[in-house]
Image (cartoon, grey):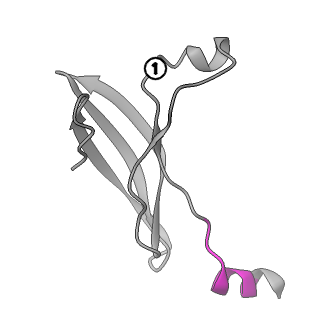
Amino acid sequence: NKRKINKLFQREKWNIGIIDQPITDFTTQKEIGEINWLPERSKGSFAADPFGFTKNDQLHIYYEDFNYWKGAGDIKRLTTDKKSQYYK
């Protein structure tokens, strides 16, 4: 079956990008700002389905950390101050 063969040798590749502008701009503007991509994950996982918010000048991003080998994902969180763009 072609689908089984593709599953063995091909993996989807997802990542999270951050754009520093209001979400309303995506429906009202023709252009969006620069995308700051998070570092790529290992070959056996990907980050997807983010939900972000700011609190006390920190950006918090909850996302799914999907592991191909487990066939499941975990919810993870990244935080940063809005100036440094350092993610932990």
Q: Is residue 46 above or below residue 11?
A: above
Q: How far across and down, in percent of the image, does residue 43 sit? A: 47, 75
Where is 33 relative to 9, above or below?
above
What residue is shown at x 55% (from left), y 57% (from top)? 14
Rendered location of residue 33, percent (x, y): 53, 26
Instruction: Judge whether 1 appears above or below 46 on screen.
Output: below
Determine the residue located farthest toward the front in the rendered image. Answer: 34
Q: Is residue 11 magenta?
A: yes
Task: Provide the major secondary structure of the magenta segment.
Answer: helix
The image shows residue 37 at horizontal and vertical percentages of: 45, 46
Left or right of residue 73: residue 57? left
Residue at the spot 44% in from the left edge and 77% down from the top edge: 70
- Residue 61 is drawn in which quadrant? top left
Which residue is pictured at 62% across the width and 66% down the height?
Answer: 12
Count of picture labels: 1
Q: Name the residue furthest top.
A: 28
Mark 1: amino acid: Gln
Closer to the camera, 78 or 32?
A: 32
Point out the stretch of residues depicted in magenta.
4-12
Residue 88 within the segment the image draws in magenta? no
Q: Residue furthest right?
A: 1
Mark 1 burial class by Cα count in 10 Å: few <14, some 14-19, many 20+: few
Which residue lies under the disc numbered 1?
Answer: 21
Query: Residue 54 occupies which quadrant of the picture?
Result: top left
Residue 58 appears left or right of 10: left
